Amino acid sequence: MQGVTRESGKRLRWWATALAFGLSLCATQVRADGAPGLWASLNDMAIHGYVDNFTILRNDTFAEDYHVATSRYRASIQLSGPLRVMQDMFNRFEYFIELRPEYESIYDISDRFGNGRENDTIAVSGRTRFPKTNKGLLTTFGFNPHKFAELWPIDNAIFPYNIVPGSKYSVPGRLRDSRPRAYFGLDQSQNDLRWGMLRDTNFDLYYPVREAYADLFFDAFGGRNWLRIGKQQHVWGKADFFRLQDIVNPVNFGEHFFIDLFDDTRVPLWSVLFEHRFGQVGFFKDLAGSIVWVFDRYTSLGFGNSSQPWAIGFGRTIDAFAFGNDLFGQALFPGRNDVNMALYKNRAPAWNLNNSGIGMRWEATVGNFRIQLTDWFAFQDVAAFGWDRINVFDIPGCNEVLPAVDPNNPMGIGGETVTSAFGPVRINVKPKQINMRAAPAVAARIARHPEFRAAPYLNGCGFGGSLTAKYHKQNTLGVSVDWFEPNTGFVIRTETSWTASALVTDTTKPDLLGNTNIYRYVIGVDRPTFIRWLNPNRSFFLSFQVFGTHLPDVHAGRYGNPNGSNDNLILTFFVQNQFLRDQLVFLIFGAYGTTGTDGTTGGNVEYLITNNWSVQLGITAFLGVRKEHDLSTFAAFTTDKRPFSESGFGIGHMQAGGSERNQMDEFWGRVRYRW
C-alpha cells in the first residue's frame, strides 16, 4: 500500500506541475503584434490525427488454427500550434500534445484471451498449449488449468504461465505473492490491458497523454538555440530496426514485436532537450550539439503481459518464472510458505533525480558525410537476472563446500536445511560464498558429461532459489556516419556503439551476473533503383543491413547469455515501391539471425483510398529451429536429466523473431481515417 501511495502521490505532483505551468502561461503578458496571451493563441491550434482498427488473423503455418489474435481500436489526437507568450524572450514558442487512447477488443470477442476464457476451453494462441504436464499440479492447488498455458510444448522442461490477468497469483498458503513484485506489469488488470493503460508504456500514469511538450527557440551564445521540455521521444542514430544509439527511450516490443515502426512503439519520457546550433565551424557544416536529461520514472523494454495477444516469448517466460516461484515453492516444500524457487523480486531503480539519465549528441556535415556522435549514461533498459540466494541439495558431493549454518540466523550466508519433496535441501545460501569448483560432485559430473562443464555445480546440486531482476547504470558511446555517393546514388550508413561494463546474465557465474563490454555495429546500404519492367514510373527503395554484436567478457556463450554468443549477426533487407501515382505502396522485409538460426519475413500493401481513408494488408511469417539454454539450478526439473532446455532466458527466443516457429504466422489489416 505504501508503494501505491507513493506512486499516486508522484502522479498527482506531475499533473499539478503541468497545471501550474499552464496557468503561468495564461497569466503571461506580452509585448508583440497579434492577440496576446495563451487563450488567443489557441485560435491558431492545428488538430491532426487518425482513428484506426488493427486486426491480426493468427494461424499455424498458414494452414490451420486460424483465429483473431487482436482487434485493437486506436485514436491519435495531435494538438499543436504557436504560443504568443514571452515573445520578448523567445523567437518562437510552440507546443505539441498527442492523446492516444485505445481499446483492445479481443478480451470481449474471443474466448482465448483474458477473463473471457470459458472454464472448459483448451484453445490457446501462439507456440504454446493447454497444460498437460502441469495439469495435475494446478488442479491440486485449486486452479482451473484452462486459465493457463504451457511454454514451448516440445521441450524437456515445461512450465505453466497465466493467460488470465489478475493482481495476484493467489497460490494457497503462500506468505508473499510474487505477481505484484517479481517484474513490471505482471499484476495489470484486464481493464488495464483492454484500454492500453500499460506499465510498459508509462500509460498507467499518464493515459491517454502519449506526448506533451513545449518548444522554445531563441538566439543566444553566438547561435540558434532550441529548448524542448515535456514528455517526448529522442531519436538518435541511423540504423533501421536496431537500437545502438537510439536508446534514450525504451521500446515496447509487446506491441507487434519489431514489425511496427519505432515511432509508434517507442515510449516517450518526461525530459529536457537543449540544442545549440553553431553553424559553420572550420570544415564542419551545420554543427549542432545537444544535451538530454530524462527525469521520468524508470521504464524498461516492454515484453508484454502474458495475457496480452502479442506478449513475446520472453514476456511469457517471465510470468512462468514468477508464477513458478510461488507454485513450486509451495508444492516442493510442504509445511513452508516462504521458500523461493524462481523469480521473486524486481529490483527496479527508484524514481528520483539520482536515477535519472543524461546524455549528449553532436551532429555535423563534412562534405558528403553526415556524422553523429552520442553518449548516454543511464540505467540499462533490460534487466539482468541473477540469484540473490540459491537452494542446494544437502547431500554428499554438494554440501561439503557450503558455508556453515548459523542456528541463530536462518537468513545468514549459509541458509538453513529444510525437508523438500526431493529430500533435504539447504535453502537461501549466498551463491558467492560457495566454493563450487571444489565440490566432489563437480569433478564427477564433468567426468561423466564433459559437455556440461559450463556450470556443473548449479546444474547438478542446485534446486531453484531466489531469482531477481537487477539493473546497473551504464555508459554507451556511439558514432554514426552516412555517406551519399552522388554518381551511383548509394547511401552507405554505419553505426557503432560501445557499452562499458554492462550488467548481463552469465550462467557460468555463481550468481548468474557478470559484466561485459558490448560492442554493436551496423553497416547499411540504401539505394533508390529503377526496375522498369516492374514499375517504369517509380524507383524501388532497396535497403540492406548487417547488425553485429560482440561481447568479449561473457563466458557462457549462447547457452547461458540472453544477449547471445560472443559474436552475433542479424541480416535484414526491405524493399519499398509505389504504384498508381503513389496511391498504392508496398513493402517487403526480412530478418535472419545467425545465433538463433531464425528469421522473420513478410510485407504489406497500403492503398490510399482518399486523402483521409487508407487500408493496409500485411503478412508475417516466423521461421526458426529449437534452441536450448542453460537452466542453472532448474536443471533438476528436466525429464532427460540434461541441464539445457528451451525454457530458459535465451537468445533463441527473440533474436530475429523466429522463436514462435510458424505458430504465430499472421495475416493482418489496418483501416485508418486521417484528418
Image (cartoon, helix red, strand yellow):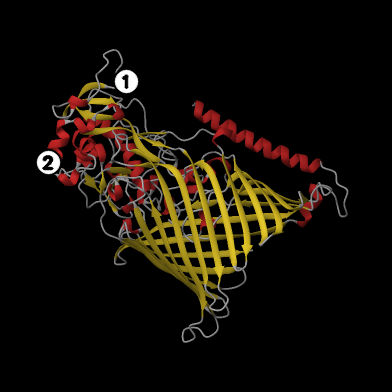
Residue beneath disc 2: 447
Is residue 656 among the parts visible in the rendering? no
Is residue 191 visible to the viewer in this orientation of the structure?
Answer: yes
Q: Which mark is residue 411?
A: 1
Disc 1 residue type (three-letter): Met
Where in the figure is residue 30, as x and y percent of width and height?
Answer: 86, 46
| Rendering coords of residue 659 (x, y %) | 32, 56
Give the SS element for disc 1.
loop
Q: Position of residue 557 (x, y in %)?
A: 30, 49
Q: Quadrant of the C terminus?
A: bottom right
Q: Secondary structure at mark 2?
A: helix
Nearer the observer, 519 or 176: 519
Mark 1 or mark 2, which has the lower sequence index? 1
Name the side, left or right, on which 503 lies relative to 226.
left
Q: CA distance from mark 1 to mark 2?
A: 34 Å
- In-image side of 409 versus 253 (left or right): left
Cβ–Cβ under 8 Å for marks 1 and 2: no
Which label sits on residue 602?
none
